Image: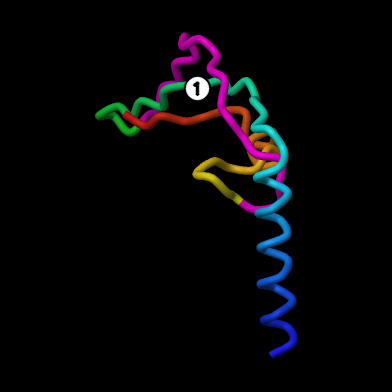
Amino acid sequence: MGLILSLVAAYFSDYTIARSNPLGTVTVQPYYEIHQKNGKTEFDYSMPPETQTCVASLLPHLGVNPCWYVTKHKMRKIEI
């Protein structure tokens, strides 16, 4: 019971910190992963970089991912 209360308290304190800090942004490079009929895969990096909104917290809140996660995943794959 104590573990559950600790996890709930940690989540709500993280949420409070996320609400008080402004949202941040990280530049993300999207690219296409194109699967061809012959079984090969082609990559197209011609898309311009995008800015992605993130929140300074440990967990995702307010419908956006945490900045530490977005920073680790700066490449966004779009499969075709």
Q: Name the foreground residue: 15 vs 65.
A: 15
Residue located at (71% from left, 56% from top): 14
Q: Is residue 2 magenta?
A: no
State the quadrant of the N terminus. bottom right
Q: Residues within 10 Å of mark 1 (few under 14, many from 20)?
A: some
Q: Nearer the viewer, residue 29 or 33?
A: 29
Q: How many marks?
A: 1
At x 54% / y 41%, what residue is drawn? 64
Q: Amino acid at mark 1?
A: Pro
- Check residue 55 for magenta coloring: yes
- Residue depicted at 62% across the width and 29% down the height: 74
- x and y percentages locating residue 8 in the rendered image: 66, 72
The image quadrant of residue 25 is top right
Q: Give the colour scheme shown.
A: rainbow
The quadrant the C terminus occupies is: top left
Q: Residue at x 50, y 9 (%)?
A: 48
Q: Secondary structure at mark 1?
A: strand
Indicate left or right for 18 with 78 as reference.
right
User: Which region is colored magenta?
Assistant: 40-59
Up-down relation of residue 24 to residue 49 (above or below): below
> Disc 1 marks which residue?
30
Q: Most extreme residue toward the left, as rendered?
A: 37
- Left or right for 44, reference 72: left
Classify 47 as above or below 72: above
Which is more toward the observer, 26 or 48?
26
Q: Position of 44 compared to 12: left or right?
A: left
Q: Position of residue 3 (x, y in %)?
A: 73, 83
Residue 49 position in % (x across, y down): 55, 14
Q: Residue furthest bottom?
A: 1
The correct choice, above or below, for 17 with respect to 28 in the image is below
Left or right side of 49 for 33 = left
